[in-house]
Each structure stands twice: as structure tokens, then as C-alpha cells.
Image: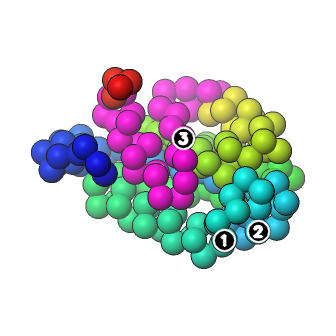
Amino acid sequence: MSGTTSASVAASASASASASVLTVGLDPVLVEDAASSRAAFPDLDVDVVRAGVAAERNRLGELGFTVDLCLLDYGRTAEAVYRAALSAKDYDLVVIGAGIRLDPALTPLLEVLVDVTRELAPAAKLCFNVSPTTTVEAVQRWWPDRKPLA
């Protein structure tokens, strides 16, 4: 976390003591299955994605967040699975993963996720990571308050 002081991390941790996060992304197994995902993320494989997701989830837990993970397919059941996850609990933040957002073939799925988030969790802050290892950074941009643009 470049540019982050221990004081700001401590402040973020105490402020997030009761904050809940839903991270949503493609099931890592699928990253290798689709040509569009392989093209969008040529250096990622299932093990790299799983390790990054687990490390970021653990780090958010260390910072005091409660974190749930929602893994989706390419669309067959994605909306129903996401609706169920979002309906199960009130979330303070929703992080949509880069695997969905940065793959042009998945733009319709991204649109559905954003729309469903606005419908079922209108108060949740919507965040986007740029890789499996930048979820903490995405959350910290928005919690407890949105950080100013540089």
C-alpha cells in the first residue's frame, strides 16, 4: 500500500470494525475456460487468482472488515446467484472484480451487476479492483469516506 501510513491504516481499521464487504467475481476456474478471459488476462491462471483473492480477503479481515465472496459463472446463473448473495445481508461495500469489468465480452454481465447493486443495495459503496491483489486498495478508496481524486 504505497502512500499509506500506519496511522491511516489504523484509522481505516478502526473505522471499518463493523463494515461488511461483498466481493464478486468470476469463479477462478472459469478464467482459463473462456477465450475472452484468457485474452484479457494472459498472465493469470486459477492458482494466481485464488491466491490473490484469499490474500486480499484475509487482509480485509485483519483490517476489521467482514468479507463475503460471491463467485459467478459467465451469465447462466450469475444474476440469480448475485441477487441471492446481495439479499442475504446488508453490505457497506460491494467490490466487482476486474475479471468481469475488464473483459469486454462480459460488459453485459457488469451492467447487470451494477444495476442489481443499485436495486438491492442502494446504500452500498461500489468499488472496482484492477486485479485479484488490489481489492484492499479498492475498498480503502471508498471506506470510510471516498478519497479525493489525485
User: Does the magenta run of residues contain 109?
Assistant: no
Q: Which residue is mark 3?
A: 128
- What is the spatial separation of the Cα atoms under label 1 and label 3, in whole angstroms? 20 Å
Residue displayed at 83% across by 61% down: 34
**In the figure, is residue 142 to the left or right of 122?**
left
Question: In the rendered structure, are the residues bearing label 2 and label 1 in contact, judged by CB atoms less than 8 Å apart?
Answer: yes
Task: Please give the name of the residue rendered at 31% of the width and 51% of the height, measured from the top-left corner.
Answer: 1
In depth, the one of 89 and 105 nearer the eye is 105
Residue on which the image places disc 1? 45
Q: Earlier in the sequence, mark 1 or mark 3?
A: 1
Q: Is residue 2 left or right of residue 125?
A: left
Residue 18 x/y as whole percent? 31, 45
Residue of label 2: 32
Front one among 67 and 44: 44
Return the x and y of residue 90 as percentages of the image width and height: 49, 40
Q: Quadrant of residue 11?
A: top left
Place of residue 148 in the rendered image (x, y in percent of width and height, measured from the top left): 34, 23
As shown in the figure, which amino acid type bears the numbered disc 2? Glu
Magenta region: 118-146
Query: Would you call the spot at circle 3 few (<14 residues within 10 Å), some (14-19), or many (20 or more)?
Result: many
